[in-house]
């Protein structure tokens, strides 16, 4: 399934179917202000301290597109439910794939969004967002609200929007997909990475599924990004923009599905749902294979336990009820017994 030969994919259907300190880890905007600080060397991040026990399980959560259907709907009922559910998961980190509120972006909306996440922040859980198209329009406001959270280690001109951070045995790359893909920066980040788990996230899908404005608007850059992520040992690319859950395996044509990268669309945190999809974009060397599609709200939990990563999509089964609907995992080669 995933980038390195020998990695295994096991699917379980339910219902319908160190590692390192980050350059900045625990400061919360608006509602919690406990600062550990971060160290920046050049444009890159620095790994601090001794390596923790890689065998201790930990998890993170990903979701996106909480914006409502009207200007005032910064805080819709589904998003409020998801905040409660995510806080109850007790993840180490939360990643948000953009579109916090109906655009254009403005500091007052970003503040309202962070206030809505008070239950998560006060639990000591850091939240790392990237911008969606509805968040554009107030760069200063974005940096004012999230500048103490997002590491300032992005490429020139993208500091505060594109970033890299590490947590324990994983590297995370947050991309501002409304800036040029920073390929040289990405290559420099992954060239020094020694962590086994690698994940990237942004707002726009790399491969078109619904909206036409995906990363394939610049095919050479998208292809270079996808190849670099795979070469780095990337497991998955998380994104939003399309308002549904969609899990795609990008078949690279070598006959081995275990080394394919996956795209996971999570535009599922409250924006009006859509159900129309097709792989109508420029797919270049890859053949998209749908693993699961669902027009429903929810979030993804990824649990890391040493060389094993388990992905669980939790969908909204009823108001305020989020239950597992799809689960799959990989084990890094040499650890198949896991």
Image (cartoon, rainbow, N blue to C red):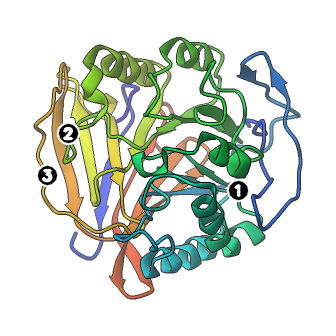
Mark carried by residue 212: 2
Mark 3, Cα crowd under 10 Å, few <14 / some 14-19 / many 20+, is some
Residue 186 in view? yes
The spot of residue 325 in percent (x, y) is 32, 70
Q: CA distance from mark 2 to mark 3?
A: 11 Å
Pointer 2 or 1: first along the chain: 1
Residue 314 in view? no
Question: Is 144 or 250 nearer to us in this picture?
Answer: 144
- On screen, residue 168 versus residue 291, left or right, reads right
Q: CA distance from mark 2 to mark 1?
A: 32 Å
The spot of residue 214 in percent (x, y) is 28, 36
- Res. 194 image quadrant: top right
Residue designated by label 3? 277
Mark carried by residue 173: none
Q: Secondary structure at mark 2?
A: loop
- On screen, residue 306 versus residue 224, left or right, reads right
Say if mark 2 contacts mark 3, CB within 8 Å: no
Pointer 2 or 3: first along the chain: 2
- On screen, residue 23 versus residue 157, left or right, reads right
Residue at position x 37%, y 15% from top? 224
Residue at position x 36%, y 24% from top? 226
Quadrant in the picture for the N terminus: top left
């Amino acid at each position: 399934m995933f980038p390195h030969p020998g990695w295994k994919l096991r699917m379980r259907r339910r219902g319908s179917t160190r590692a390192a300190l980050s350059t900045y880890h625990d400061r919360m905007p608006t509602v919690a202000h406990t600062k550990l600080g971060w160290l920046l060397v050049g444009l890159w991040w620095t790994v601090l301290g001794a390596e923790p026990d890689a065998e201790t399980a930990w998890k993170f959560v990903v979701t996106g597109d909480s914006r409502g259907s009207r200007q005032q709907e910064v805080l819709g009922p589904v998003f409020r439910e998801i905040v409660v559910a995510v806080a109850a998961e007790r993840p180490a980190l939360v990643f948000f794939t953009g579109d916090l509120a109906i655009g254009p972006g403005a500091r007052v909306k970003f503040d309202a969004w962070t206030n809505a996440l008070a239950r998560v922040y006060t639990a000591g859980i850091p939240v790392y967002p990237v911008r969606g198209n509805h968040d554009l329009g107030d760069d200063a406001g974005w940096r004012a609200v999230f500048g103490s959270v997002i590491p300032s280690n992005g490429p020139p001109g993208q500091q505060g929007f594109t970033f890299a951070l590490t947590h324990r045995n994983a590297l995370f790359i947050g991309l501002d997909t409304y800036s040029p893909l920073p390929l040289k920066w990405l290559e420099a980040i992954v060239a020094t990475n020694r962590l086994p788990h690698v994940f990237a996230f942004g707002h726009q899908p790399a491969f078109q599924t619904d909206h036409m404005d995906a990363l394939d608007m610049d095919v050479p850059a998208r292809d270079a990004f996808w190849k670099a992520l795979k070469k780095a040992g990337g497991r998955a690319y998380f994104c939003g923009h399309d308002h549904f859950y969609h899990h795609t395996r990008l078949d690279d044509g070598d006959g081995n599905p275990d080394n394919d990268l996956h795209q996971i669309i999570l535009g599922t945190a409250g924006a009006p749902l859509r159900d129309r999809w097709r792989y109508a974009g420029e797919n270049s060397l890859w053949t998209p294979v749908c693993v699961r599609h669902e027009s429903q709200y929810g979030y993804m939990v990824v649990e890391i336990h040493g060389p094993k990563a388990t992905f669980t999509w939790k969908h909204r089964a009823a108001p305020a009820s989020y239950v597992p609907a799809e689960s799959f995992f990989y084990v890094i080669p040499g650890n198949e017994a896991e």
